[in-house]
Image (cartoon, helix red, strand yellow):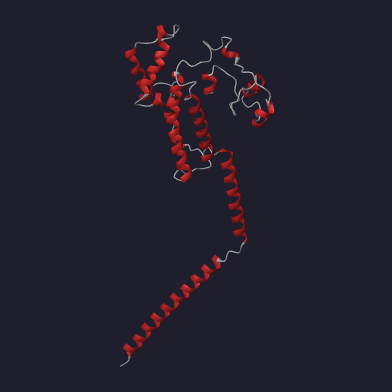
Amino acid sequence: FIDYWMEGGLMRDIYTHKLTTPEHWNMLMIPGGYAVEDLDYDLVVGDREVTPSFDPHCSNGDVTDGCKPKAVISAEKLRDYTEGPAETTKIANVLMNDQRMGKYVIAQEAWDCIWEELIVRGKGVKTVYDRPGLTEHDYNFSAEMLGGMIRELDRLIAKYSGNKWNSNTDANRIVELIVEHRALIQVEFNEVNSGLRKLTDRDFLGPKERRRRLKLKEKDNKLGTQQTKRKDSSKYFRKLEREANAQKKRKRRDMRKLRKESKMEGDAMP
């Protein structure tokens, strides 16, 4: 919903990013209300001309000062032990400059202390760092899903670095953050494609990758069934081998016994 906030609540189709109608927008805003195919832009909107419409919540006072960002904050940087204090300062400055909140903001010299107590010492609410046994890096995405992420990030980078937005501070910040994030996703994408990063059925695979894995399992199960139907003679031959070895041992034992008896008879002769 970056476009939504940057464009003041302008109604767009979340799949194609085209301008859409209030009817279609209201359908999109019902979580789980419709199947994806029922929300298809061509099906609901078609080729009719769409007049730009804005979410009423942005103009009727539900959102104070309208649906435009006061600042762009990175949750990842806020949790980062190097960049976290600076990100905290950005939040504090927004609150300080608000007529309603400014008088309640604590002194600036305490901001870093608050960040350290909450993030470093973990005295605040639970974050992903507090999750037992797993970290956010323990989850993998398939190349299918990573490719989709990269395409969407490329779209946002191209849009908000264009002439219309290049003098907008929030747009510049968005591009800065997305470029960093895209580089990380590209590394992960390359690792998945090269096999360096191994995927499991518990990862975020996407429909195409899941179908591919299901077909491989079905093929393996079919092959396994065919092999099971074949007569397994391995036990029979292992039994023969054991019997042959036992027979050899008996012969060697009998020969040693015979040689010993022959020697004893020779020693007993005058």
Q: How many labels were placed on the picture?
A: 0
Instruction: Report if residue 119 is visible in the image.
Output: yes
Side of 191 where 32 appears, left or right: right
Question: Furthest residue to the front?
Answer: 163
Q: Nearer the viewer, residue 171 or 2?
A: 171
Write the residue at 46% across / 24% down.
174
In percent of width and height, residue 67 lies at: 53, 15
Q: Nearer the viewer, residue 155 or 259?
A: 155
Write the residue at 60% across / 13% down.
56
Side of 268 where 44 appears, left or right: right
Say if 70 sits above or below 42 in the image: above
Assign the N terminus to one quadrant of the image: top right
In percent of width and height, residue 250 lies at: 45, 76
In percent of width and height, residue 217 lies at: 58, 49
Write the residue at 59% across / 59% down.
227
Say if 268 sits above or below 242 in the image: below
